[in-house]
Amino acid sequence: MKLWIRRNLFRTWWDGVLTVVFGALAAWVIWSLAEFVFVTGRWSIIEVNLKLLLVGQFPEESLWLIDGSVIAIAFWLAAALGGKPQAAEDRQSWGARLGDTLQRFGLLVALGVLLIVLAGTEASLGIAAGLVGAIVVGRAVNAARNRWAPIQRIPAIIWHLALLIAPVALISLTLMQSDVQLWGGFLINFYIAIISIVLCFPLGVLLALGRKSTLPIVRLISTTYIELIRGAPLFVLLLLAGVALEFFIPSEVAPGSVFRAVTVFTLFTAAYLAEIVRGGLQSIPKGQIEAGKALGLSTVKITFLITLPQALRNVIPAQIGQFISLFKDTTLAGAALSIVEVLKVSEAITKQDDFLGQGYIYEALAFVSLLFWVGSYVMSRESQRLEKRLGVGQR
Amino acid sequence: MSPLVRVPAKTPLWRDVRVLKWVFQLAVLGLFLGIIAWLYNNYQVNIAKSKIPTGLEFLDNPASFTMPGNDFNQSSPVWSAFVQGFYNTLRISIVGTILAISLGTLVGMARLSKNFLVRMVAGAYVEVIRNLPLLVLLTFMNLAVVLQTFPRIEDAWKPLDLFVVSNRGIAIPWFEGSGTILLSVLAGALLLAVVIAWIRGKYSDRTGKPARGLLYGAVAFIVVTLGAWLTLGYQWTLPFVEDRGTLGGLRLDPSFFALLVTLVIYTSSHIAEIVRGSILAVPKGQGEAADALALSGPKKMRLVILPQAFRIALPAIGNQSLNLLKNSSLGAAISYFELTQIAQITVGNGSPAVPAFTLTLLVYLSISLATSIVINVFNRRLALVER
């Protein structure tokens, strides 16, 4: 211990000075944060407006649909992801696995507990119980898939489609029950991000293939698109879509602000995704393509069966990084398109009669920051883990 | 002897790869042109319906808004507003890039420090900032820090009596009235210092004597600056509070300050990761070779590791500076008068949206392209030539 302190904190006199300065800085930051969170922070503004921050003006009587969707998504994630049968020698003890899971998702659990405390209702406890139940059932289903022969024989596509039935049904029902324009708060950030990710993925892959293509016209079109979009600020594109999108589509269609946001985020992220996928394509050794040719596969088959799957696997962390920044950028939709997303709500609630002019902006922004920070941090940690597990760069 | 397989004399057209490639390309081109034509047609129809002009004539109209802090007024033409916005965008991007690269390099090096506390603080800084949305940081800086925590002008903070900090902005000591002369003198001195350092380097290559380029350059720089001070005698002023405002010094608008600090913090957290990665990417043997030559820690860093790390980091850092330029468009969200804010205001005042925003996008695009050309030239000169 003494040696550690000597080695790590007081190697030379200069090191000692640094230690004192940075120690004071760290202590001050931690002290003021703790004071803010536990003493001076007036969290009633969050308690009162929790629903506005999370789901905006979403109709009260349909809230159960959102709860149900979240639970169904948790079930799907738990059932569909991970859980490869491990070799007997790396199988960990229950304690180690619990510790591992806590380290991975502890922040999410803490955030959930915090939300329950802030909400302070029995309904929120019910949702939490539902979530825990869904995850347990999901893991059990996943384990059954890995161990039990009759279930193992179900083809992967059918299996995954079957797992998706519940979340997709509930989400579609939610969409049918209420107008997206009424949604708000964190829900709309999440919704815009997910829809844009799903839509931009195929476009981005096609653009990457186009840019790597040997066909000159296809390459020219893809390259021009990618470079033009990458040279433009997202905020300007959003503003442009806010005032000018209606000029470019038939006048019978009246675009809502969410539609505009999704359009821009999709077109924008596709260009960045294309560059990432192109990097992945370039990382595939030439021998892979030559092997495909030697087997007599057509170019299309070589691309979709050999190069593309490997390329996408190699750049998973970069893709997730791009999706994280899309998730963070959804806050721009509030400033550019007046969508009542969570940042907009957090500014608005400080202007309510009860809270006006008393400096509640700290509390409001702290809550929003926490939501985004936990989401982004957990996602980026998971992507690093995934990178290790897939053995990118080691195979 | 009869052939085992009968080969047709000529490949039919529908199986000829060359033909297929062109057919496919023409189909893609057709689809692409079709989409463009459809969008353009919609645009024409909708424009005709609402009678909105499509040209750039709006640039000569009066702007009918004012900007604080310069002689731009209600009747100035729209194009001069765009010029002012362009200038403001460049100003914040250049200052921001310089500060972000400096801070990012320090934090990146701190993340690899042998000192546990330094490493942890730098790590926490990067992990916290990188995972927050830029707009949340900007809103925090603008609404919570500048507009709420900074005092009103009557009881402004005056650290060391050099600065005046209030919610009306930050005022710093400045060479009032002689800013351009000062800048040109500084630029000249810097150029001279670089040239002298270069000559010393050549001299050292030829004779094997130590170059001491930094020392000679610094001496030249100081001599020129001091000489110019004594001969030209430019004065500088301290800011002071006068009648609910500040006089003297250089006043930074609250929005400029908030945007600058936010962009620097956000970009530096990304640059720190790049710098860290690049330092780790320098082959281990280089550091060991420096140790074997008994170079001290700072010398090893400055002469061996950092130059090579910088070469690896250059393209990525260039990308980050372009991101900073593009992110400066968020100034429009806090009413900093940069390009995007100008475009938004003029469109609000009745300029046609599509030409105005297209112009804005073209300006961003050309700054981006110019910057990336410069970065590419540097990169080509610095990149390792491998055979």
Image (cartoon, coloured by chain):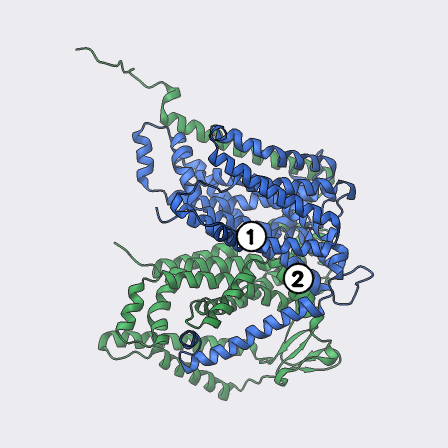
Chain colours: A blue, B green
For disc 2, the marked residue is: A366
| Rendered position, B72 above or below B22 | below
Chain letter of the residue carrying label 1: A
Residue B349 in view: no
Question: In this rendering, would B211 be left or right of B340?
Answer: left
Measuring from the top left, give residue A376's x and y in whole percent: 56, 54
Tally of numbered tags: 2
Q: What residue is rendered at 31% in x and 18% in y? A: B10
Q: Which of the 4 image quadrants contains residue B40?
A: top right
Residue positioned most to the top: B2
Measuring from the top left, give residue B52's x and y in whole percent: 71, 43
Chain letter of the residue carrying label 2: A
CB contact under 8 Å: marks 1 and 2: no
Badge 1 marks a residue whose secondary structure is helix
Q: Earlier in the sequence, mark 1 or mark 2?
A: 1
Spatial CA distance of label 1 from label 2 is 21 Å
For disc 1, the marked residue is: A105
Q: Which of the 4 image quadrants contains residue A250?
A: top right
Q: What residue is rendered at 44% in x and 42% in y? A: A312
Badge 2 marks a residue whose secondary structure is helix
| Rendered position, A274 above or below B164 | above
Q: What residue is rendered at 44% in x and 38% in y? A: A209
User: What residue type is disc 1 on?
Assistant: Phe
Q: Which of the 4 image quadrants contains residue B174?
A: bottom right
Question: In this rendering, would A117 be left or right of B216?
Answer: right
- Residue in front for this viewpoint, A152 or B238: A152
User: What residue type is disc 2 on?
Assistant: Ala
Label 2 crowding class (10 Å Cα cut-off): few <14, some 14-19, many 20+? some
